[in-house]
Image (tube, coloured by chain):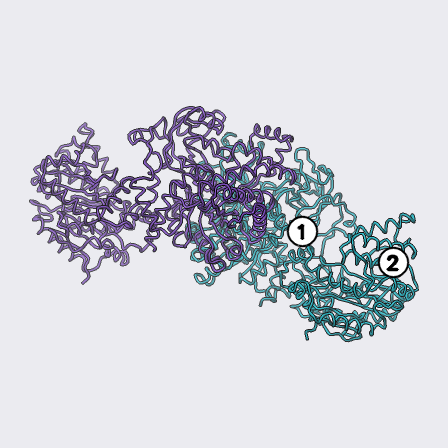
Chain colours: A purple, B cyan
Amino acid sequence: MAKYVYFFANGKADGNAKMKNILGGKGANLAEMTNLGIPVPPGFTISAEVCDYYYKHEKTYPDELKAQVEEAMKKLEETTGKKFGDPSNPLLVSVRSGAAVSMPGMMDTILNLGLNDETVKGLADATNNERFAYDAYRRFMQMFGDVVLKIPHEEFEKRLQKVKDEKGVKLDTELDAEDLKKVVESYKELYKEYGKEFPQDPEKQLWLAIDAVFGSWMNERAIKYRQIHGIKEGELLGTAVNIVAMVFGNMGEDSGTGVAFTRNPSTGEKKYYGEFLPNAQGEDVVAGIRTPLPLDELKNRMPEVYNQLVEIFEKLEKHYRDMQDVEFTIERGKLYLLQTRTGKRTAQAAVKIAVDMVEEGLIDEKEAILRIQPEQIEQLLHPTFDTEERKNAKVIAKGLAASPGAATGKVVFDAKTAEEWAEKGEKVILVRPETSPEDVGGMNSAQGILTSRGGMTSHAAVVARGMGKPCIVGCEEMEVDEENKQFKANGVVVKEGEWISIDGSTGEVMLGQLKTVVPEGLVGYVGKILEWADKFRKLGVRANADIPRDAEAARRFGAEGIGLCRTEHMFFEADRIPIVRRMIVAKTKEQRQEALDKLLPMQKEDFKGLFRIMKGLPVTIRLLDPPLHEFLPHEEEAIEQLAKDMGISVEELKETVESLKEFNPMLGHRGCRLAITYPEIAVMQTEAIILAAIELKKEEGIEVIPEIMLPLVGHINEMKYLKNIIVETVEKLMKEHGVELKYLVGTMIEVPRAALTADQIAEEAEFFSFGTNDLTQMTFGFSRDDAGKFLKDYLDKNILPDDPFKKLDREGVGQLLKIAKEKALPVRPDIKLGICGEHGGEPSSIEFCHMVGLNYVSCSPFRVPVARLAAAQAAIKHG
Amino acid sequence: MAKYVYFFANGKADGNAKMKNILGGKGANLAEMTNLGIPVPPGFTISAEVCDYYYKHEKTYPDELKAQVEEAMKKLEETTGKKFGDPSNPLLVSVRSGAAVSMPGMMDTILNLGLNDETVKGLADATNNERFAYDAYRRFMQMFGDVVLKIPHEEFEKRLQKVKDEKGVKLDTELDAEDLKKVVESYKELYKEYGKEFPQDPEKQLWLAIDAVFGSWMNERAIKYRQIHGIKEGELLGTAVNIVAMVFGNMGEDSGTGVAFTRNPSTGEKKYYGEFLPNAQGEDVVAGIRTPLPLDELKNRMPEVYNQLVEIFEKLEKHYRDMQDVEFTIERGKLYLLQTRTGKRTAQAAVKIAVDMVEEGLIDEKEAILRIQPEQIEQLLHPTFDTEERKNAKVIAKGLAASPGAATGKVVFDAKTAEEWAEKGEKVILVRPETSPEDVGGMNSAQGILTSRGGMTSHAAVVARGMGKPCIVGCEEMEVDEENKQFKANGVVVKEGEWISIDGSTGEVMLGQLKTVVPEGLVGYVGKILEWADKFRKLGVRANADIPRDAEAARRFGAEGIGLCRTEHMFFEADRIPIVRRMIVAKTKEQRQEALDKLLPMQKEDFKGLFRIMKGLPVTIRLLDPPLHEFLPHEEEAIEQLAKDMGISVEELKETVESLKEFNPMLGHRGCRLAITYPEIAVMQTEAIILAAIELKKEEGIEVIPEIMLPLVGHINEMKYLKNIIVETVEKLMKEHGVELKYLVGTMIEVPRAALTADQIAEEAEFFSFGTNDLTQMTFGFSRDDAGKFLKDYLDKNILPDDPFKKLDREGVGQLLKIAKEKALPVRPDIKLGICGEHGGEPSSIEFCHMVGLNYVSCSPFRVPVARLAAAQAAIKHG
């Protein structure tokens, strides 16, 4: 006969912690604790297999169920010495759902089941508290009516309010037993109004509650919850039902209830941490009406119970090998554990606990690594707000959390002012509708950046992450009025010079100047975890870094090279941009060459700077990528100045600016297409790279292996044409200077066609770096700058499980990665494969890169530790 | 011993027409004619295998070659009774290259080889014309010096000019023998100045000429020619060398030279057609100094020769089974054929000749079909310019030939004026920098459209092709000055109201009003060819048609359904656009619904119109696709009007317009993304489609099977979400009206991700229609509106073999088609697969669609006949 009901009581349970799939998390842990000899109120769990049966058999139960439940109830009565429905000593139970995966979206708990007009009196006698008994009764009626019979919750509240109004009081607690009896009567009427009858028969109550729990598995909230969390239809059997004898912490001063963590969930300190409320029920703690006492107080009040609790903590930690979050109740001096689960914790605590537990011998290094969410590591690298000040801060708007960390400063609305004020020692927050490369200087001077437009991979977001600066983008609640130098958000007007604080980890914008706290960084516990991670990971980790400061951060965080140096960022420096503009506006090849000749020594010094810091580690340099348009000024004033500088008419310059405008710049004249039109640019950049390497070798003995990378290649002929030019340039320089260098020429794979024809491209390219930002844009046909408008709908309506710009889309974009690898390898078995899109710093994407078998990931410097950890986790999980 | 030299003389040749790969086209045909008993001057061909050897062995020849050439020369001397280098009766030869594929980019011909200071005298004696002999000599020296020794051509011209100047004459013909002797001497000096010596030894001349021919195989022009024409390295062995005894048509009145076609190459009429020049050499005909006589004149002058020639024509046509283009020379009453090849012909002639030849039993229907270039068919459907007027027209600019046909009209610069003038009966050409959907009315009123920006798939190009109107786009030589209502092109200013003529087949813009000629269309010979084509093709052919007029054209041209009806085009009608704008600007769902309710009956009538014309043929209707932004006005005046109409402030409206602007609208909020944000739009459109079908069934007994198509799907969940909404809407209407309809719900495949996940999408989609315009944009990452800026460089530098927006890129985009088919078929074996991008009307792309195994192609109505023919050719070629 199939077993559907799992009993637990008195140190013996039918189930255990390993049976989560049929008992659910809660049921399995109750059984486990029982087996461990930990005092748990007796009860039983109806297997999730019954839920599965229920939906496969038109909402009916297997024949054996009824008898098994009846038998379990009988055992429960025997164990507790109480009787279900007994007016003098009634057994009351709680009925709770509980699936293998915690699903907060499912049905609420029903407590005090078993109460009726008769048993409520028995409860009043037993507790010596008639008020408590009737309060429990009316609560049960309310929960039961709402959850089981779908009578709207508000209707109950209205009835309750009415009684309070009649008495002229405000709080529930001001009602006495007689008042609550009135409420009970009024609730019975309410049931009738809805064509229902409150079942006085506890047996009936029980089965209706069981029906309701199984029914809740397919309610809208639960289905949505599973969709959102990627739990597929059929992945879980369903929910189990836990039926547990009620215990009461409000039976006098020898009773109480509390929650506790076996270690400090905030700091990770190995010290019990919790709260305790004497003569109270769990709900009272949650309601916050009474202030709970610290756990230590229990030591004074009930030392024996306290010692017993501490023993249990030790036992649980040893057993579960992780910090536990427990609920307990003391009923007349007797301790009961109601729940145990792995405790949630801060990033700092997670790291400390994991490291401590390895040292305590509880877990091994691999497990310690798996215990940390990689994203948490980054929190430990960025400033945060002072917790207290943060609590009281006025949030005026919320945008996309584009680059983590806390920043505070005076509001400015343009890059120039940001730079000027910063020079004077002011802290500023740069607020813009959106940023463009012209704003980079100002962004660099600011503490943080806030824009009203753009998505997670907009210019502001990408550059800010690169700089490691807090940034919020797409804050559409905010209206930026550049002209009047102010912004408006939800009715609040903030003018230039006023203080605001932004939290780049949550996307919140707050009024005023908040204190920030700088974290310790990569030392201590974090350093230990990353040291272990490096032992296990197979993926290399590089950083995207364009300037020496980035490169230094990259090395500090453990990057093993630069996977993406965007040369154009060098073009925006104040001393370069005029020359760059001359190059763009040039009418002849000669004029262009003249400008390039001026840029050459500057670029060369840039590269020397990077190479010197990277000390022989690989450095991948991408040739000029963005549309030339981005380098030109768009404001009247700047155009006039440039025209003057260049000795051409404003009209002529405007014509050039106009002619460079594109309908879809993302798909326009950019990437290697620029070098094909103007090979002289590629020549200059190659010269700068190679000369830098030659000089470093000669002057400082540093061996550099530059990796020259072409952006936006889609056709083998682009690669061939430009590789020829590059190789010719390099060979000429090496001959001229009598120096032999190793160097590689490779390409981004960021156009779908490149992935599809990777076999051809691999004939010429010595490495591939997947540019998954653009690849995602083109594979989905989503402009990352515009997707904000509809992506929200897509996520809300569960059309996409995740923002594909954040988490690599494995099925589509990921498929292209696989195709590219499978096509390239037979052609060039030693081809180096990396990723340098934003995804290179996102754990799920990194896991995928490991599974596909890439050689390395490259991400912004502050994500390097995240990537190291995520790569280790992937290696541990997938071998 | 390997055979490298193939001799031909006196009715017997070593080679034949099938040996083109080693003898080249010219050599093979000379051999073939010899074997046919046609009089050909004797000679021999050096195999292209020698060329292959030459490049594989550091420019040396196989050992056997010298002896074989010497032997062939000896035989040539025997055959002609002349001797190479013999001063009294010299054998002269021509040396010509000739590969298997005609390559005009290769070396020029060398004539009269064998002349030197001695043999020239013999020639003078033999021809009794000293002037001729020295003229031949100096020409030989010039050709030899230029082609073989790389002495610049202009240097020879300068020397010649000097002699003319000294004599005070202008024309070469005014120089007498003595003058020409001076020229010869001066040429000898020129050789010396360049450090060369003119070789007096004919043997030496011959080998230097042979070297030069083989050398020319790898000259820049030839390499480029092969690249452009897609001839891959190694596909051809190389060039052959033809050495043929000279014959002279200028040996008196019983000599002459001519060219002839075996049928009229202009009309196709079965009548010999050619020209003849007595006492002249081929060069004289080409030079145009003397006016040639019609071929008939030969009948009068040399009836026997004429009869012989006619017999040869008959023999050649019967033998080659195609119209021939021959060159002949008569030397002292003896006829020689110098060349025969398949004659080039006009579209009209091609069709007539193919049909005639089937009726004559020369070829079968399949071969007739293969003989016509599908593109030619379209020429027969569009007006052309009167040939004479066209010859003399002044071309002022050239753009991209975006939609074929000839148009003439007065220039207007805005759509409104176009409509107004057209209403008054004026013919107008609409000239714009670019067009937008707001211009559609004006485009419809115009005879033709001319834009200075945009590519082959820009708005103007696509809409014009749909309308079958001549159109030139991307005419960058033209600067449109809208303000002053004029344009400027290459210095010519054209003002509003002035006449221009545009040739949409060549891209040429001409001044003035040219007469146009309307062709006969799909009757007669063209009809016959297409009737045959329909027997063989396996691909269905549908049309892209949005309005009844398009649908009528589609049926007239033989479309078997509508493959793409773009519903948005219906939204631009004057009575709709205000309502559409209200829908877009709506602040609430209710406001939007109100506008949609007004659009519903209009859309329903649109669909009824289409369905009625298509009489039960399938009609695929695509739901709203373009970004909403495109429907809003952008000019101050229009915005003010709309704000007034809608009762909102101009500022509010402008904000909406602004908020809808996108960085990359191509990748923005469009396609099915609109329907996901505003499902009510999809509901309205579905209702209109289904109600139209229901009413037609009830009222007119027409059975329609609507195919509802979602644009821009990239993820199965988009498809699921919208299919649910559509199916629900349809089922509700069918129930309401008590009518059962068959209908399909399918999707465009135009986003790379859709192709990559076609297995998932096929679970829901009942058909796929490949939208290769967008698929090409996203697979390459090319914006079709912007690609003009760099595509030219790509084509010039041979980075791309073709414009991928014109000819489907088989390797990249085509690979996605294959992937999609292979993934979809196992999931849904009866899935209907079609293509509806511009490529659906392009022959090479159609061939590919046949090879991939699609079910149908869909193209603009005027391309339907092209597609029918191309589909038949693909079926014949690939089975």
Residue assigned mark 2 = B135
Q: Chain of mark 2?
A: B
- Location of the N terminus of chain A by quadrant is bottom left
Residue assigned mark 1 = B404
Task: Evaluate if marks 2 and 1 touch, with contact meaning CB atoms under 8 Å apart.
Answer: no
Count the labels in the image: 2
Tag 2 secondary structure: helix
> As drawn, is A630 to the left or to the right of A321?
right
- Front residue of B174/A93: it is B174
Q: Is residue A84 visible?
A: yes
- Location of the C terminus of chain A by quadrant is bottom left
> As drawn, is B422 to the left or to the right of B626?
right
- Give percent across and percent down for residue B139: 83, 58
Residue A360: give its label: none
Category of crowding for the residue at label 2, using alpha-carbon neighbours closer than 10 angstroms: few (below 14), some (14–19), many (at least 20): many
- Give percent across and percent down for residue A374: 34, 44
> As drawn, is B8 to the left or to the right of B299?
left
- Give percent across and percent down for residue A781: 49, 47
Residue at (29% x, 54% y) in the render: A236
Task: Indicate whether A291 appears above or below A211.
Answer: above
Category of crowding for the residue at label 1, using alpha-carbon neighbours closer than 10 angstroms: few (below 14), some (14–19), many (at least 20): many
- Front residue of B193/A406: it is B193
Tag 1: amino acid: Pro
Q: Quadrant of residue B335?
A: bottom right
Tag 1 secondary structure: loop
- Front residue of B59/B41: it is B59
Q: Chain of mark 1?
A: B
Tag 2: amino acid: Asp
